[in-house]
Amino acid sequence: MSDKPWITSKGMRWVFWTLVLILILTVVLCIAFYPEPYQFFKQTISSLGQVKSWPSGLENKISAWIFTIGFGVIAAGALFMMVAYTNVKGFYGAGLKVLMLFIFFFGAVGTAFPADHPDSTYRIYHIIGAALFVTGFGLFNFIAQLLRFIRKHVPKPTEGKRKFDFYLDLTFVILTFIAVVWYLLSGLFGFLGFTNSLVLTIFNLFISQKILLFVGCIAGFLLDLDDM
């Protein structure tokens, strides 16, 4: 029998790239089929999957179904990656990555429920899921970038100059970390009911959520085989 693993780093990277593409496609299609103009600075991504549009309250059936199916597929992909990291030997930092994917998976499942579902239980699932999804997505990218950075760039070479990829890796380790913290603080201040206009302007949940997803998508496509 062959000892060759049934999935390699290259395959895992393609799976994650596919999930990022599905996320982007889901958001783009939802905006395209949203029954009224999507207000980037006043709505979260969750608005695209609601039963009724905002602010007019129009029926949002097509966009809502695209949203639910898209996040359902993303959840299935995250579950696949968890199983692969758990059962295939040789992946660096597999335990940490499984933990981040666990958050990402349950976040995607919860996010798939409409934020304005008639049943309050499902609305709670969505709120928790959306927070877990964005956080898990950002943290997986951060952990993958950080572990690769540690493996490739520590200690500092004794001869020659740092290569371009050192600075690229370092930049996205820092940017992803800042984006995750910024998003978490934005959600925390909103949950605690902060009314200070300066705080709410800086830690704007509508913006911080999108920044984290944007940074996460770029970081995802920059992952190399060592990251996986």
Image (tube, grey):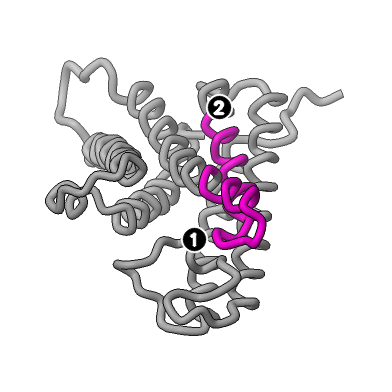
Identify the residue shown where x is 87% and y is 23%: 1
Q: Position of residue 59 (x, y in %)?
A: 59, 80
Which one is nearer the viewer's eye here, 151 or 72? 72
Q: Position of residue 195 (x, y in %)?
A: 21, 49
Mark 1 residue element: helix
Q: Is residue 176 visible?
A: no
Identify the residue shown where x is 67% and y is 54%: 72
Identify the residue shown where x is 21% and y is 38%: 167
Q: In this rendering, would 64 be left or right of 134?
A: right
Magenta segment range? 100-128
Say the numbered circle drawn on residue 105. Answer: none
Q: Are marks 1 and 2 in contact (CB under 8 Å)?
A: no
Q: Which residue is mark 2?
A: 99
Q: Which residue is mark 1?
A: 46
Residue 91's quadrant in the figure?
Answer: top right
Which one is nearer the viewer's eye here, 138 or 224? 138
